[in-house]
Amino acid sequence: MECLEAEGVEHVFGIPGEETLDLNESLADSSIEFVPVRHEQGGAYIADVYGRLTGRAGVCLGTLGPGAMNLTTAVADAFLDRAPLVALTGQGDLERMHKESHQYIDVPQVFAPITKWNARLSDPAIIPEVVRKAFKVAESEKPGATHIELPEDVMAAQIEAEPLPRRKPVQPEPSARELLKAADIIRGALNPVALAGNGVIRANAAPALREFVRATGIPAAETFMGKGLLTPDDPRGLGSVGLQSGDYSMAGFDEADVVIAMGYDLVEHSPEHWNPGKDKKIICIDSLAAEIDEYFMPEVELIGDIYHILARLAEECRHVPHSGGSQRLREVVHGRFEAAKDDPQFPMQPPRALYEIRKALGRNDILISDVGLHKLWIGRMFPAYEPNTVLIANGLAGMGFAIPAAIAAKLVHPDRKVVAVNGDGGFLMNSQELETAMRLKTPFVSVIWENRQYGSIVWKQDKKFGRHFGVDFTNPDFVRMAESFGMPAWRCESVEDFPQRLGQALSADVPSLIVLPIDYSIDVAISEELGTETVAT
């Protein structure tokens, strides 16, 4: 606990177990708030999003066996979406790990492929080193999940030790030669285009990106994880790409001779979709050297602090401003979004629902998307004005993300409005955390898009086979369910109901819930020009 306090940990989210009794006893006497959750996955998702929004590792806790297993989905989400997280799991005594034993599985081996680093505390003397390393690795670029296993007998041992001092991770800088080489390529390009991703948000480099596109005239597209890097009205913004095969061509990537990949994680979307001919000159601006991919072979790699690199590159390239880029993608999407404000249909269609949510939220308020067909609509269409105001589970894309994420968002930003959009499929996967939200008094609005189907699978099955199967279900009365938690809740019966109920919910000082019947008959592929979908929901 002293080591966690030295790391600046404010919360631990999880469920205590018999094998974590000594740990929890120490937590009770520490400055850290232990937040009991109702499922370990919910606690790990809260830690995941806490890490995304703060840049400091969120911490989650589970006991041995089933507790540790229940953490894995959200830990893997943090690993793939580059969110700093430290998972703590209990374990039985060291003396029984060599044989079959009640509830014993080799947890570090299970966690190995979904963490950047993980270790078993085999001796209390190594606690300061292990904790310091877990946080350093989790928070260093590219951030992600780490894990520490805590055997019961080790946790009960006495030790005289001090925490190791916390140090901020150091970022390298590209050489002047490489930076000038990149500038020469950009200045000589006929149709350069930029692709900005999650790394630019992690580096807090949105101001540098905005100045880069202003100074150079080079247009930029955003990945789903990069939403909000450019404002929707920025004339150099090309919109969000990555949903359909035609996105990149309509954003001008087909004609581009140079692509500047900024903080672009390949897990976000395969470069094969925007460089199918392997003929683009690629400049990679990132915190780590590029992943090896035959469609992503950079001419120059500028590795280090993305903010600093973009600022220097803008200075070098502002003398030859460009004026390329196609606005066709943004025009199609924005046109459909604007037209939705007059859509009278009920059950509501997704664009109208998103229009009303956007109207009710400020520039810095937060929309969180669970996973399902609604995520594609949000990623495609919802306008974001600032980074980290649209939160999406993208790399692993696990359902049940939104409610825990909303709790984390309100803990980090209690002054902002938060809306979580869930499908009725994903909502029940972590709906138990509504009790946690009520106990913590984190007022956010859960909007359930109800259609009684796994909508994204219906869409894909219908496209591929002309029919769907195994996707229909019934729902409980969500309003009564929410009221049983003690929160206000409403079911919309008309188009006019939704903005009225949303306004009431956003003014409440407790969590609330709105059930919105939704009509998915309109295709998320809003234009035939955009082609077929290329990502999973």
Image (spheres, rainbow, N blue to C red):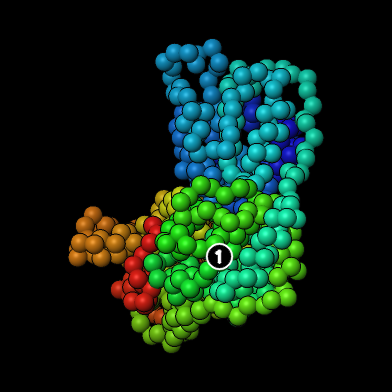
- Which sits in the foreground, 97 or 466? 466
Is residue 462 in view?
Answer: yes
Is residue 38 in view?
Answer: no
**Mark 1 surroundings: few (<14), some (14-19) or many (≥20) residues within 10 A:** many
User: Residue at position x 57%, y 49% from top?
Assistant: 290
Task: Indicate left or right for 36 with 467 as reference.
Answer: right
Estimate the x, y position of residue 182 in percent, counting from the top left.
66, 61
Q: Kindly give the residue lying farthest to the left in the view shown.
A: 466
Estimate the x, y position of residue 484 in percent, counting from the top left.
46, 56
- Which sits in the foreground, 312 or 382? 312
- Tell me: residue 227, above or below residue 46: below
The quarter of the picture where the N terminus appears is top right
- Tell me: residue 424, above or below residue 231: above
Q: Kindly give the residue lying farthest to the bottom in the view shown.
A: 342
Count of numbered tags: 1
User: Residue at position x 50%, y 43% from top?
Assistant: 76
Task: Indicate left or right for 351 with 85 as reference.
Answer: left
Estimate the x, y position of residue 428 in percent, counting from the top left.
40, 53
User: Residue at position x 59%, y 27% from top?
Assistant: 119
The quarter of the picture where the C terminus appears is bottom left
Q: Amino acid at mark 1?
A: Val
- Tell me: residue 407, above or below residue 206: above
Q: Secondary structure at mark 1?
A: strand
Q: Which residue is mark 1?
A: 259
Q: Quadrant of residue 306?
A: bottom right
User: Residue at position x 39%, y 80% from top?
Assistant: 494
Estimate the x, y position of residue 355 in percent, counting from the top left.
49, 78
